[in-house]
Amino acid sequence: MNQTWVLGQRALREAWRTPEAILPTLFIPLFFLVVNVGQAARIFPSASTDFLNGQSYGAFQLPASLLLAASFGTAALYLVEDIEGGYFDKLRAAPVSRAALVLGRLFAEFVKGVVIAVAIIALGMVFGIEIASGPLGFVLLVLLTALWAVVFVGLLQLIALKTRNAAATNSGSLIFFPLMFLTPNFVPRELLTRPMEIAATFNPVTYLMESQRSLILDDLDWGTIWPGFAVVLVVGAIMLAANVRLINHYD
Amino acid sequence: MSGAAVEAQGLVKTYKGRGGEVEAVKGVDLRIEPGEIFGFLGPNGAGKSTTVRMLTTLLTITRGSATVAGVDVARDPDQARRRMGVALQEAGLDPRQTGRELLVLQARLFGMGGGEAAERAGELLRLVELEDAADRLIKGYSGGMKRRLDLASALVHRPEVLFLDEPTTGLDPASRITVWEEVRRINELGTTVFLTTQYLEEADQLCGRLAIIDGGLIVREGTPESLKAELRERTGLSHDPTLDDVFLDATGRTRAKAEGAVSEVVA
Ligand SMILES: Nc1ncnc2c1ncn2[C@@H]1O[C@H](COP(=O)(O)OP(=O)(O)O)[C@@H](O)[C@H]1O
Ligand SMILES: [Mg+2]
């Protein structure tokens, strides 16, 4: 536990020292938020669009931004760097639980996820977005975003540990395309065309997005909120088990 | 307990890759006594790094067994890790930390508290003469500075046995001599040193005893003097053989062939 903390601090220091890698995870999602709202907001005026619950289209789009911010997975590339540069072997030569070697980075990812989520939501609030579910909802929204960031990086870490190759890990991060776009990201699921609706229903990220959207647009509506957390916890558990298994058999 | 600092019996490593299996180490036996500087000499691809990585718990052992400081490396890897230090062929350092941060982190991974770790880092920075660069990012260090920091990081926990895989490959002659001096100093403080090298002079200068490995097998073993004497006796050479001659004889290369394959260094 203590070792996870020490390794997590190092990963955070590394993130702090490479702002050029962090800033895009903040600005690209904000860019998409502005662009998407600019393109579609007039189709969905808040007064006459039921699914907006009286808020602006920006409020509806915010979850897509948060999820995008949480799906960069830069930390997995740092892991590849550690492996390629030999530093990972130095860490492995220490009497550290193998699990701590991967958990440290995931812990750092959680902290980064919290910071970025708070920053994006706060900016949204400056521009009039309200978190209808209140302070508890705000915390849940941040938590869900940060947990997804951990899960996503954890999945990429699997590729990093398996291939030990930056190009392969980079390619792996492209799974964010289907995960992010086969979702009801412009309109609610009921309004999607049939094939898209089927795809979205099978995409676990859909439930995250709907959970986040509910936290922004509705009172605490547990029926829609819990599936998002369930997705993160189930995929997260699989991701953790696979990471620990891989690192224990790392040769 | 054997009392040996390092002991290996029938060590074998088979890599499984796309092109089938490669037997990189084919049955290595070793016994190194506490206090020695032991040299593991061999051309590129002989199996030096593979052997070191097995002995240091970084690579699973396909067959055979090994103990370091009396601890079985496969059965009790964490205990073995506490008793040995490792500096690998590619100085594995994190460019985004400072030298001091890297040492403190390493010390903490070996169980020291914050204050103790900071103190130990300071001591080691003095030992390898990196105090001035201690708070700069490692990114900016020269090759020799990286080696010395790597050496220091292998020593944070005062290991009984220190493994150095080609500690001077790629260094300029002056840095090479500095590293040799560090290694001697560390050894004088009581640490057993196991070092691999492809430089004959390095083995001759530093090592009390050495083994020559070629194609995954140990082909000669002894003190530099005994190896030279043996060659002289066996071949009836008129001149005193050098370690070069022993190496070339052992690895079955002619001098001409060796020119491309084995780099030698005159410091
Ligand atoms: N990860 C690996 N996978 C497959 N073959 C390897 C691997 N590492 C080393 N080898 C092969 O094993 C042999 C010994 O390599 P190595 O131990 O690195 O030699 P040395 O350190 O003496 O130069 C070489 O033929 C090398 O190509
Ligand atoms: Mg090698």
Image (spheres, helix red, strand yellow):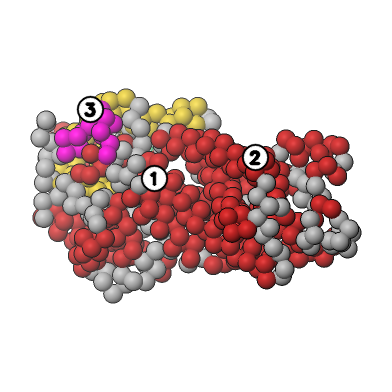
Q: State the extent of the magenta-drawn residues as a range.
A: B65-78
Q: Which quarter of the figure has residue B139? A: bottom left
Q: Which quarter of the figure has residue B8? A: top left
The answer to whether one can see residue B105 in this image is yes
- Which residue is the site of mark 1? A100
* Quarter placement of the C terminus of chain B: bottom left
Secondary structure beneath disc 2? helix
- Which disc is residue A227 wearing? 2
Task: Respond yes or no on whether mark 1 lies under 8 Å from ligand 1.
Answer: no
Within 10 Å of the Cα at label 3, are there few (<14), some (14-19), or many (20+) other Cα atoms?
A: some
Q: Is residue A51 magenta?
A: no
Residue B182 coordinates in the image, percent (x, y): 20, 60
Q: CA distance from mark 3 to mark 2?
A: 56 Å
- Which disc is residue B9 wearing? 3
Residue B185 versus residue B171: which sits nearer the camera?
B185
Chain of the residue on which disc 1 is drawn: A
* Quarter placement of the N terminus of chain B: top left
Q: Is A148 situated left or right of A79 in this image? A: right
Residue B166 coordinates in the image, percent (x, y): 31, 50
Q: Is B14 situated left or right of B1 in this image? A: right
The answer to whether one can see residue A205 in this image is no
Name the residue located 33 percent from the left edge and 63 percent from the top edge: B101
Q: CA distance from mark 2 to mark 1?
A: 29 Å
- Which disc is residue B219 wearing? none
Chain of the residue on which disc 2 is drawn: A
User: Between tags 3 and 1, which lies in front?
Assistant: 1
Instruction: Specify the amino acid type for callout 3.
Output: Gln
Within 10 Å of the Cα at label 2, are there few (<14), some (14-19), or many (20+) other Cα atoms?
A: some
